[in-house]
Amino acid sequence: PGHADPVLEAEVLAQTIDFFERKLDGDPYNHVVGNRLIDSHMLQFKLDSELDHLRRAEEIARSLLAVAPDTATSFARLSLALLAQHKFTGALDAAERAVASDSTDEAAVGTLFDAAVASGRYELARLSLDRLEPGTLTWQLRKARWLAFLGQADDAFGIMNRACADLERGSVRRQVVAWCQTLLAELEHGRSGQEKAEFWFEKALLTQPDYMGALEGLADLAYARQEWNAAKELFGANLSEAHPDLYLRMAEVSRALSETEAADRHEAEFVRLATAPGAEALNAHALAVYYGSSPVEGDRDRALKIIQRDLDRRRSMEAYEVLSWVRLRRGELNEAMVASGEARRWGEPGPSSDYVRARILEALNRLSEAEPLYRRALAEPTQLDHHVLQDLWHSVSCVRCAERPTS
C-alpha cells in the first residue's frame, strides 16, 4: 500500500464501483457482486464523506436480503451502512440478525460489537468481544477499542499497532491503512500527548494523501493551539454534508480571524445541514452542544429536546456527557450531576468529561471535588472538545478557567 499511487487508486475505486454497478444491473440478485459493491461504496465514503455512498450501500444490502433473508454477510454489511448513518436501532437489529444467521461468522460478531458500543449496549459489546477468536484482525481492532474505552491506553495502543502493521503488510487498500493509523493517532493523543498524535496523523497522510480523518485530527490540534490559519486550511479541506460540525468549527475559526461574514455563512450552513429532514440522528450531539451553548433560553430548551431524543435512540456514554453539558448550561445542576454520573458508569472518562463535571461541582460549591478534575482535564488542553475549549477560553464563572491561554 505504501508504494501505490493515491490518484490512481482513487480512479480504480471509482471504476470498480462503476463496473460492479453495471454488473448488478444485469444480475440484481448476485450476492458476490452486491457485497463487493457495498464494500466499495463504504470505502469511497471514507475518502469523500459523501452520504450517497452510505445510502447506496444500505439500498443494495436491503435488496440482497429481500431475496435471501438469512445471509449473515448482507446483514452485517447493512449494519455497517446504518451505523455510519447513526441509525443505531436498525444497525443493532441488523447485526443481531447477522449473528443469528451464522454465529460462527467473525465479521458478523465484530459488527455486533461495533453496533453495541455505538448504541450504549456495553454488556452486549463485551459478550460479543468474548466470542471473537483472539489474535485475529477482527479481534485486534475491537479489543484495542474496548481497552481504550476502559482507559487501558497502553495495552490498546500495542494491539492496535500490531493490527495496523498487519494491514500494511496485507493486500488491503491504503485508505484502510490510513484509517488504522488515524486510530493510532487518537490513542497516542490520550497516552502520550499531541506530538505523538501529530506524528501518526501525518503518517496516515503519507499513506493516503488527503485522508479526511487525519486532516480533521490535525485541524483539531491546530484549533486547540489557536493556530487559526492552519486550522482554517485543514478544516476547509474537510467540509462535507456528512460532517456539518466542521462548518461550525470553521465558523469559530473565522470569528477568531475577525472574518465575521464568513463565520456567519459557515454557521448558517451547519444549521442548514444538521437540521435538514432526517439529519438529526446523524448530528444530534453537535446540535445539542450548539444550542446548549447558546445564551438564549429557547435554544437551550431545544438542545435538551434534541439530546433526550438521542437518548431514546441510544443510552451511550457520549449521549449522557452531552446531556450533562446541556443541563449545566441550563443551570440544572443536580440533573447535570446525575447525567455526568450516568456517563461515567461505563468506561474511562476523558478530559472533556472531567472538565464538565468539575464545572458542575464548582457551581455546587464543591470546590475540593472539582479541583482534581480540573487538574486532570487541563493537563493536555488539546484533548478537550471544541465546546469545552470555547468555555475554557471565555468563561467568567470558572475558577480554574482563569488559568486558560489567551484567546
Image (cartoon, grey):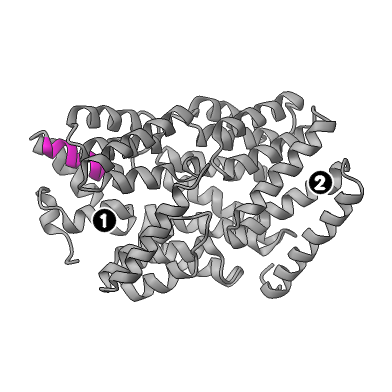
Asked if residue 399 is positioned above or below residue 304 in the image, the reply reads below
Instruction: Please state the horizontal and vertical placement of residue 81, each as a whole percent of the image.
Output: 64, 43
In the depicted view, which residue is nearer to us: 171 or 121? 121
Query: From the image, which quarter does the C terminus lie in?
Result: bottom left
Asked if residue 344 is positioned above or below residue 2 in the image, the reply reads above
Instruction: Please state the horizontal and vertical placement of residue 115, each as a whole percent of the image.
Output: 57, 35
Query: From the image, which quarter does the N terminus lie in?
Result: bottom right
Residue 389 is tagged as 1
- Secondary structure mostly taken by the magenta-highlighted segment of the chain: helix
Residue 160 is at least partly visible in this image:
yes
Q: CA distance from mark 1 to mark 2?
A: 45 Å
Residue 34 is tagged as 2
- Disc 2: CA contacts within 10 A as few (<14), some (14-19) or many (>=20): many
The amino acid at mark 1 is: Leu
Please state the extent of the stretch shown in magenta in the rendering: 354-363
Tell me where residue 116 sits by quadrant. Answer: top right
